[in-house]
Image (spheres, grey):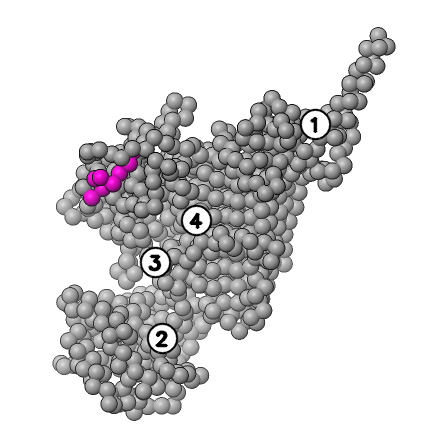
Amino acid sequence: MKHYHYILAFLSCCFSTQIQAQTDIWVAPNGADTNLGTKENPLQTVSMAIRKVREMRRLSENNFSKAIHIYVREGNYQLYEPITIRPEDAGTSLSPTIIEAAPNEKPVISGGISLSGWTKVKGNVIGLPKEAIGKVWVADAPKVGGNILDFRQLWVNNQKAIRAKDTPYPTMNRILSWNKKEETCWIPTPKFPEIAKANGVEMFIHQWWAIANLRIKKMEVQGDSTKLSFFQPESKIQSEHPWPAPWISKETGNSAFYLTNAIQFLNEAGEWFLDKKAEKLYYIPRANEVMEKAEVIAPSLETLVRMEGTIDHQVSHVFFKNIIFCHTSWLRPSQQGHVPHQAGLYMLDAYKLKMPGTPDKKTLENQAWVGRPKAAVEVSYANHTGFEACRFEHLASTGLDYHKGVHDNSIKGNLFKDIGGTGIQAGVFADEATEIHLPYNPSDEREICTNLLISNNLISDVTNEDWGAVGIGAGFVRGINIEHNDISEVSYSGISMGWGWTKTINAMKNNYISANKIHHYAKHMYDVAAIYTLSAQPGSVISENYVDSIYKAPYAHIPNHWFYLYTDEGSSYFTIKDNWSPSAKFLQNANGPGNTWQNNGPQVADSIKVKAGIQTEYAYLLKDKKQADKYWEINVEKPVIVELISENGQTIDRKKLDEILLKSKVSQEALFQWENHVVIFDKVQDVYLLRERLKNAFPKIQIKTYDDLFYEFNQEKCKNGKSVKEWSHTILTANLVADTTLQKEYLNYHATQFEKWSEVSQGFCNADFQQLLIYKNGRQLMLVISIPKGESLDKLNSKTIENNPKMVEWNQLMTKYQEGISGTKKGETWVFLKPASN
């Protein structure tokens, strides 16, 4: 018996020594989970390595005194279920668990399935457009568990392919109308009316600051118009929720849309279609793709890693380094539709109160409950964890999500690229059971996302499917520090911080957004900013950020409704200082109290620009930045024109108008008038808000905004041209003739004027015109001529034609396309709007 106890003690001692000695676990694609996990005999899966470490810690009598490393060798690790990290897998401050790439290797953790066996389609396929015949390749649809794999993304040689749609990039169509009571939408009849009989067709619609994916239940073709109805639950939510609703506007166009997921749409290189009934996948290769050799991957898993504890038993001291996470799916839009409220959070229920007002907000009429999209990596109830130098690529929804009960974590030096939704998400936005406008302030503060560092990450080409998602999205967070990130090629806002739309003190405070470089954003959506905030956040600071290059979104609901910085409803107790941007185009909407704005705009020192963005240690990330989109122009802040037209002897109450101008920070010198036309010409921070105030104040007066600035001359067109500091403006208005062919000719002349009629701009230079702008709304034109203050337009205008016969010819040519507006005399074309005096 004594010998038996001696033997057990000896074995226990030996095993304990082995545990202490082996603090490196190795994983390789050619390993086996029955191996020891040494470098020579590696395991095959990360999950087994985590289990091995768990058992090592459980059986160890003493705490480990150094880190335990799980080294992952280069190769592809295809997952069939998420890697799960539990509280029992926690490390310690002295002995963290580090899951990292083997030195100089690039392991890939993938939720995708490789597809092979591609052959060129011979003959015709029912429904395939004629222009696609001879271009299409086909493979058997992938199966998982004996069932056809459903998916919404496809990658060919790690380039995202396009789910077949009815318009080529970047064009979209416009809806005709929306009937909320019937829950139906009218659109122009598609090119292929036979898709009315197809199954699985979806509508992608652009509405204000969010999109929606709607599964089409029925299509009723009636001549050149077609009525759509949709499946539930998205049909009810889409028609009942008030914000953001489909946009209907004669001035800027109705909401844009496209249809997708029908074989009839398969006609462009890079497009694919999954025929689930025939169990076939069709694809039209791009020019550089050889299908026999191409790596084609369809996503299967929605989540790759799930790190989750409980409020009393958290995961801690677990870190990932140099791991590549890629190829995830997200199927909710295919199963229940997708109608987001904001920042990618989708609505579970939403409607307008019949009687506005809630205890927290007396005027609130919008009610909504939201869900949270899936993420490739999800973390909840975890502390002292982190991701460093990892790559999050080719993902369907959110990249990395630190959700609830997380504190003292870090996200540092990672790449987030080619992601359908938000790059990094943090904090509770609203639990599914809680209405989104209620302030979140849990009794147990351990629930709050606290002290999260998001630093030196490159975030580029995210939000490429859900255009209303953001680069970095933070909800009710505390002590978050978002610094030195580079964010570009996003469809909506760069950084969105806060939730609740409330001035009520809540869980948020002491948040910092500093030294980030945010550029080439707002590619598709407006009501937008590089940095956007909501609700009260005492002690929070936005400083020393570099903001530049906001895209000119082609289907924006209000083309001027874009900003560099935007503190939205309830934003309170912020300090916003020393942020560089090309102009002071900022919006403060229903703010306060306690906000301080100091030294923001183009006057900020260049040193701020130099220091912002990714720091030297992580500069290697910048080689992966996606290039700017060649189809998109960059916005430059220009004055806008708002016109008020009174009729039938109506008068505009000047006192009331002056009050609105003061509230909207518009100078009284910006007013011009001719007869019953009053024009506001100024740099207006929020033209939409100004217009709404004017509508409410003058309900019987027609109000028009001029967003279409189609021609601009400035001193940069002149040799040695220099602008003077003070200008005076002359505004004139006329109509284009009704003939649409002549209208196109007129616009084309102005589009090519600098190249084909250079003498015209030379005439403007000779006259010392500082700027010349032409806006259009329908047929009506607004011409603004800016000259040095104190000069005479008549005197300067005569210089445009001196020794300049081509200028004379141009002026004569333009008379063919112009006529006077209503109220002008016979033969009168351009009329002058004079400064409106009190």
Q: CA distance from mark 3 to mark 4?
A: 17 Å
Q: In which image quadrant can residue 118 be found?
A: top left
Discs 2/1, front: 1
**What residue sits 24% from the left and 51% below the top?**
176
In this rendering, is residue 454 above or below 37? Answer: below
User: Which residue, given by chain and number where applicable, does mark 3 sit on?
Assistant: 631
Amino acid at dot 3: Tyr
Answer left or right for 768 relative to 87.
left
User: Which residue, given by chain and number where applicable, does mark 2 sit on?
Assistant: 681
Magenta-colored span: 131-138
In this rendering, is residue 350 above or below 727? Answer: above
- Which mark, residue 56? 1
Amino acid at dot 2: Phe
Pick the front one: 796 or 460: 460
Between discs 2 and 4, the one toward the N terminus: 4
Between discs 3 and 4, the one toward the N terminus: 4
Discs 1/4, front: 1
